[in-house]
């Protein structure tokens, strides 16, 4: 099989290796016409003629650029190329005429871009790829190099912000669970970033030193974002009195599960704080890394993994006479949900207690699906997967409800818990804002000093835009 770089180099018909290498060593940019296969004499002489010492020093190691009637190509090194369609580049211009620097919204009318738009001239500059367009005003666009590399789609290159650094864990996480101090979180953004980074990497984090009151716990929750109100209320403060029609409001054991499988959009984070437990024992908290268990299942039985990734599971919340929740579509969503672009596992949805009738299974799928969930359950309940911890007043825990399953052992006595749901979008937004300050990616670092780039506190080339 030919590598993508080989195919690209073949289609571009570059200069002989010796000539290209000589030009690269001199630090001169190469600009080629893709259709001709070699540069025109005038353009070639203009682009590789010896530059002044200062100019030559600035342009050393610049990528090679090429263009034709439909695409612009960028050569990062002799083996790595990216191709960008002309219409794509024009649509992503971020000059003040095309992109509102304060609102971070597109001003350019995409539908007025000619289908056959092509550059008059492309050239590598120290700050990025410069494109002069064949328009009435010879519109000029500049695309930072690192931004282009992070957004390369032909071929896709490793994107820094999307390379997973998640830590998969089993029962041995008990030796050093992710933890942050309450005072550290409440005193400033650095502590909050540490807390949310723990959740991002591990799927959960403890917070120690929390005053054992609902008021302090609610304030802690709101450091992340808006508390999500549901049919359980906004901020919870409850005991096992069946005040709500859910087994969480009993003394029964709860198996490992994620919450809100009956919602179209399950909550992102769930925060718990045990305020007191008197007159009894039990109620040990169970945490299971769903991503870790999924990786085990995939290795043991890829067919079962595929079934859990494909078959939707309907669910319901029907314990309250005033509400009846089902996801949309009613057939629900699969247990394992993946990113369409990277095929990375993004979400686990599993609560066998809330599962509805599996009436949508094809006859040939019935036995396969039941065998798949049997294996899934076996992996969930493996001693290697289960992390049991006895919560104490003063230590709260927050879990990523799209990844970590939770449960508890049965208990007796009076056990008072409080906590809240927080939306996944609010959580991700807060983490993204804090990352801009405490962990800027390569695009933010490389473009921070460009003129008119950081406006209203945010870089216009942020890869999230």
Image (tube, helix red, strand yellow):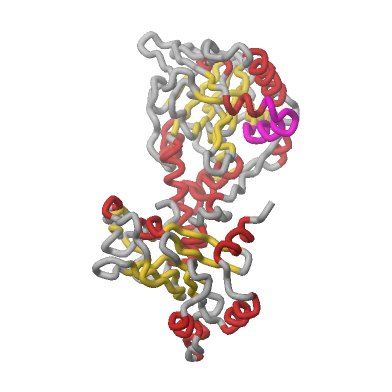
* Residue range corresponding to the magenta coloring: 289-304
Residue at 52% of width from left, 30% of height from top?
A: 272
Q: Position of residue 186 (x, y in %)?
A: 46, 47
Mark count? 0
Judge whether 32 appears above or below 432 on screen. below
Image position, residue 203 (x, y; %)? 58, 38
Question: Which residue is at a point 28% across and 50% down the rendered structure image?
Answer: 111
Magenta portion: prevailing SS class: helix
- Camera-nearest residue between 314 and 286: 314
Q: Where residue 107 sits: x, y (%)? A: 27, 55
Nearest to the observer: residue 108 or residue 66: 66
Instruction: List the single residue furthest toward the bottom.
Output: 52
Horizontal side of residue 102 vs 155, given as left or right = left
Whether 299 is among the magenta residues is yes
Question: Magenta segment: does it hold 354?
Answer: no
Single out the residue that lies furthest toward the left.
136
Q: Quadrant of residue 367?
A: top right
Frontmost residue, 188 versus 125: 125
Q: Residue furthest front?
A: 36
Q: Is residue 324 above or below residue 403?
A: above
Seen at 29% across and 60% down, the residue is 98
Q: Is residue 456 above or below residue 14?
A: above
Q: Quadrant of residue 231?
A: top left
Would you say residue 458 is visible in this rendering? no
Does 100 sit above or below residue 206? below
Looking at the image, residue 26 sits to the left or right of residue 128; the answer is: right
């Amino acid at each position: 099989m030919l590598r993508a770089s080989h195919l690209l180099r073949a289609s571009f018909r570059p200069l002989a290796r010796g000539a290209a290498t000589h030009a690269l060593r001199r630090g001169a940019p190469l600009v080629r016409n893709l259709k001709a296969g070699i540069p025109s004499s005038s353009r070639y002489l203009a682009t590789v003629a010896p530059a002044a010492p200062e100019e030559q020093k600035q342009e050393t190691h610049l990528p090679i650029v090429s263009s034709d009637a439909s695409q612009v190509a960028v050569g990062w090194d002799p083996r790595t190329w990216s191709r960008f369609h002309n219409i794509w580049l024009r649509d992503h211009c971020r000059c003040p005429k095309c992109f509102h620097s304060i609102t971070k919204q597109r001003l350019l009318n995409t539908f007025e871009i000619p289908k056959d738009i092509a550059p008059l001239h492309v050239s590598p500059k120290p700050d990025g790829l410069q494109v002069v367009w064949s328009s009435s005003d010879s519109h000029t666009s500049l695309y930072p190099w690192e931004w282009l590399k992070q957004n390369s789609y032909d071929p896709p290159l490793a994107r820094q912000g999307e390379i997973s650094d998640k830590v998969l864990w089993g029962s041995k996480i008990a030796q050093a669970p992710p933890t942050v101090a309450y005072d550290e979180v409440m005193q400033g953004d650095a502590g909050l970033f540490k807390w949310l980074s723990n959740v991002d990497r591990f799927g959960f984090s403890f917070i120690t030193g929390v005053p054992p009151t609902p008021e302090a716990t609610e304030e802690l929750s709101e450091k992340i974002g808006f508390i999500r109100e549901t049919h359980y209320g906004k901020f919870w403060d409850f005991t096992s009195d069946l005040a709500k029609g859910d087994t969480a409001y009993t003394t029964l054991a709860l198996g490992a599960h994620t919450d809100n499988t009956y919602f179209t959009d399950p909550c992102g984070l769930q925060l718990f704080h045990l305020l007191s437990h008197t007159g009894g024992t039990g109620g040990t908290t169970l945490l299971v890394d769903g991503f870790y268990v999924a990786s085990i299942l995939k290795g043991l039985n890829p067919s079962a993994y595929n079934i859990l990734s494909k078959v939707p599971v309907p669910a319901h919340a029907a314990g309250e006479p005033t509400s009846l929740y089902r996801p949309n579509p009613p057939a629900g969503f699969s247990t394992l949900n993946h990113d369409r672009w990277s095929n990375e596992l993004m979400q686990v949805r599993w609560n066998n207690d809330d599962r509805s009738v599996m009436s949508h299974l094809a006859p040939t799928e019935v036995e396969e699906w039941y065998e798949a969930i049997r294996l899934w359950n076996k992996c969930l309940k493996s001693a290697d997967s289960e992390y049991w911890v006895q919560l104490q007043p003063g230590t709260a825990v927050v879990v990523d409800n799209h990844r970590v399953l939770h449960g508890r052992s049965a208990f007796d006595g009076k056990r008072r818990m409080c906590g809240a749901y927080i939306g996944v979008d609010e959580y991700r937004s807060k983490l993204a804002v804090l990352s801009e300050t405490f962990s800027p990616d390569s695009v933010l670092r490389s473009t921070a000093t460009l003129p008119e780039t950081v406006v209203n506190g945010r870089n216009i080339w942020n890869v999230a835009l």
